[in-house]
Image (cartoon, rainbow, N blue to C red):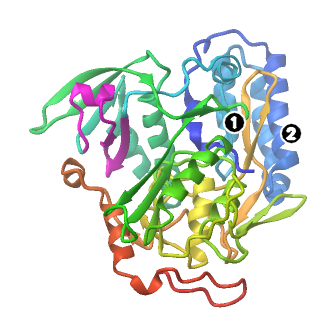
Amino acid sequence: MTAAAAACASISTASAPEASEPISSSLALSTFDTLWAVVRNTYVDTAFVASRWIGVRDTLRPRAALVSNRNDLNDLLAKTLKRIPDSHFYIIPEHAALASDTDTSGAGGTTGLDIRAIGDKAIAWRVEAGSPAARSGIVPGQTIVRIGNRDLSAALRQIEALPVAGRPRALSEVLHSFNHAVSPSTGTRVLARVETTGGKSVDHELVAVPATGTVSQFGNLPPIAGRVVAEKIGGQNASCVGVIAFNIWLPALVPEIEKGMADIGSCMGVVIDLRGNPGGVGAMVMGFGGYFVDSAISLGTMRSRQLSLHFAMNPRRVRSDGSSMTPFTGPLAILVDPMTASTSEIFAAGMQRIGRARVFGERSAGAALPALMDRLPSGDVFVHAVADFTDPDGNRIEGAGVVPDEITPLSGKDLADGRDTALEAAVRWIRSNPAARRTPVSQPGSAHPNFN
């Protein structure tokens, strides 16, 4: 399975309350040794392990003997993980992991603000109606200058100094950290500085309220409020376009996803909105993909050291209540953006490569590796990749991400005008392609129908 690693990627950089807590060098050494051994024993890139990972141990292990507090340990682990060239290697601090084990009362807090980037500007992408952000007067399209003491533009400008190949993943991580900052535990106060029309800056104090959704737990990650939204555009008859969006791939959402698909399945086309979806349980793509194919077909292959697993989709012909259904074979569009990662990339890339869907939006994160979680002697949780994934054509998604067939960059003016240009482009494509409607997906090994 692919862990919901990117879902809480920003947690890995959160400052623990006990950062100055004394830590013995023996605990630091055992923590470093455990992390190093986990990578040696499970990382799929055995060439890296054989050629470079031993050098990492020889260089950094002596520093563990000098560790005297938790902050020193955090710095050492961060330096160690930076030597690994792939995503899905990070630390969930002990305080966050323990909170997820013992307390769900603060889970799913939100201020109702979603942040994205346009160049080096952080922008209010969505503002939930009736939320603290909406009540304070924040509207889509406005520039978010600061969150707390953090200068958001400065953080985005640092990405431009990185090698081009590393920017998509860095942008994803930065955006996740921004959005994590405005989605703290219920009752937490967040100070947001917003630039209004005319360049004036206004400070807003936002108090997080409980987020709506199905709160569930995945491994050692904090509780997550999962949400599924399904709607019809253009009326209730067969000329409508159905849109389904969910913010994470977790089994607790399966009943809501099934209901959403039943609600929109009679439309002429379907849009799957995976913008902001950081991933989750990888195996779910096979079941979900079954809604859209009428023969068995693979989304790609996951390879670990021990085995290979083909992500085969089989047509869904029976609902969970035992009633019969027919897979949707009309035109299918998928929306992605820089915060689309992991399982979401596996699904979007696979459906794009087999010719079953056309992708709209902005390039995804390129952070697609499957990962597991292990508790370290320090109490922290180590998230680490254990396999690689390639699309149906044998290409890696890691690093490359999903490049939309039709790129639709964000515009502050469009957001201020209430426009969703990626969704508009997807709906326009669906409505302009009547010949593609209800076209069966081909059998494996034969030519795929042209949905592009």
Residue 5 rendering spot, x and y as whole percentages = 64, 42
Residue 299 rendering spot, x and y as whole percentages = 68, 69
Q: Which residues are magenta?
A: 113-140
Q: Is residue 116 a member of the stretch shown in magenta? A: yes
Task: Name the residue carrying label 1.
Answer: 218
Pointers 2 and 1 in contact (C-beta within 8 Å): no
| Neighbourhood count class around disc 2 (C-alpha, 10 Å): few under 14, some 14–19, many 20 upward | some
Q: Which amino acid is tagged 2?
A: Ala
Residue nearest the viewer, comparing 146 with 332? 332
Residue nearest the viewer, comparing 173 with 322? 322
Residue 200 rendering spot, x and y as whole percentages = 13, 32
Left or right: residue 432 compared with residue 305: left
Q: Is residue 91 above or below residue 248?
A: above
Q: Which amino acid is tagged 1?
A: Phe
Left or right: residue 265 compared with residue 305: left
Residue shown at 80% from the left, 47% from the top: 53
Residue nearest the viewer, comparing 30 with 420? 420
Residue shown at 28% from the left, 34% from the top: 145
